[in-house]
Structures are given as C-alpha cells and as structure tokens.
Image (cartoon, grey):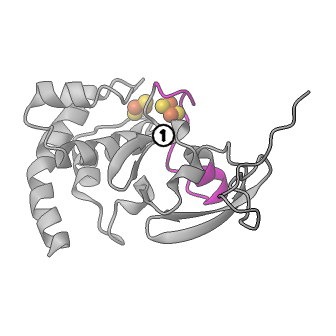
Amino acid sequence: MTTQKPVTRGTDTDPPLLRGPGPVTVALKVNGTTHHLDIEPRVSLLSALRDGCDLTGSKRGCDQGTCGACTVWVEGRRVLGCLTLAITCEGHEVTTVEGLADGDALHPMQQRFIDADAFQCGYCTPGQLMSAVALVREGRASDEAEIKEWMSGNLCRCAAYPHIRTAILAARDDMAAHDREHDA
Ligand code: FES
Ligand code: FES
C-alpha cells in the first residue's frame, strides 16, 4: 500500500497545502456577513449555507444539479449550490435569496413574483428568483422565448412557468430603475 504524501509549497518549512479530509475552517462571506465554518472540504455550498449559516432559503430538490432549487450567486453569477464546494467560495461573495431584499423592501423581482402568482408551493421559488434576477442582468430577458430558454435550468413541479415568465418581463424595467438607484 502506498501512502499519499502531502503536497508542500516548495520548502520543508511551509505548511502543507492539503486541507482535510477532516473539518477545516472555511470563511464564507454570504450576503455581506462572514461565517467561519468548521466543515469538511467535501461539503457543498448548499449544505454549508443551510446547515452552517442557517440560511435555509436555498433548497435541495435533487442534490445532483438537475433541478435548480439550490441556485445562488457567487460573485453575482448564478451557480448550483449543490455542485459547488463551499471551500472553493472562500474569498468570494456569495448571495442567497435572503440577500435579495433591501431591509423590508422586497427586490422588484420578488414583488413581481407575488403580483403575478409566480409560485404555489414555493419550494423552487428561491432558485427561480436568483436565476431570474441574474437572467435580467445577463440581458437574457428580451422576450418570453428567451426567458423560457435561459430559465430552463429551474424546474417547477407546480408548473408556475407562464406566471414566472410574466413576472420576469414585468420586473425587467423595474430592475433597470432599481439597479440604477443601488449603483448610484
Ligand atoms: S439541488 Fe441543486 S440542482 Fe437540484
Ligand atoms: S412553486 Fe412549487 S415547485 Fe415551483
């Protein structure tokens, strides 16, 4: 049997680069707050958010990258939390659905989802919202067909799809004003 040697940084005095497989401290910045978590490197971002940060808005529908219920942003880009290792997010801004509202003021996309009845059970909704806001910022909400295509990674068993598209179209213009205000 061979023993794996730890990778070193080049000199004998440098600490080994290997972290884990036991728990290691990972600093995760989520919605502007840094959480120091003792987790194994194998832990997904989704698990770290839900179990370590007590942010249970992000949902686990499949844990294998097919449903989109776990969609969050890393540096403003949408990613699947179940397929992202928490440790790889150190030093990056993570945003979850809990970070969308501005205090008591809902994000325009959240308000439009309510206005358009764009959810029923609500389980897919956090992921839908995170995808929808990113979709508009990506410039991929020009019409229903484009929205349908670029929201296709977010499944909804309650079949709220037509209402979700209505909400996104309505939120698109609100968001231009909202983002201008927040960037000012
Ligand atoms: S839980 Fe991540 S894609 Fe389904
Ligand atoms: S609202 Fe129930 S799964 Fe989408």
Task: Locate the N terminus by quadrant.
Answer: top right
Q: Is residue 148 above or below residue 83?
A: above
The quadrant in which residue 62 appears is: top right
Q: Position of residue 23 (x, y in %)?
A: 77, 54
Along the line of sight, the residue nearer the viewer: 153 or 12? 12
Could you tell me which residue is drawn at 43 percent across and 39 percent down?
Answer: 122
Residue to which mark 1 is pinned: 70
Q: Does the magenta segment cover residue 57?
A: yes
Along the line of sight, the residue nearer the viewer: 97 or 5? 5
Whether residue 38 sits left or right of residue 110 in the image: it is right
Whether residue 182 sits left or right of residue 96 in the image: it is left
Q: Is residue 180 above or below residue 140?
A: below
In this picture, which residue range is highlighted in magenta?
48-66
Kind of residue at disc 1: Cys
Task: Locate the C terminus by quadrant.
Answer: bottom left
Question: Which of the four quarters of the rendered structure image does ligand 2 lie in?
Answer: top left
Q: Position of residue 161 (x, y in %)?
A: 27, 27
Q: Does the magenta segment cover residue 51?
A: yes
Q: Residue furthest bottom?
A: 184
**Mark 1 CB lies closer than 8 A to ligand 1:** yes
The quadrant in which residue 17 appears is: bottom right
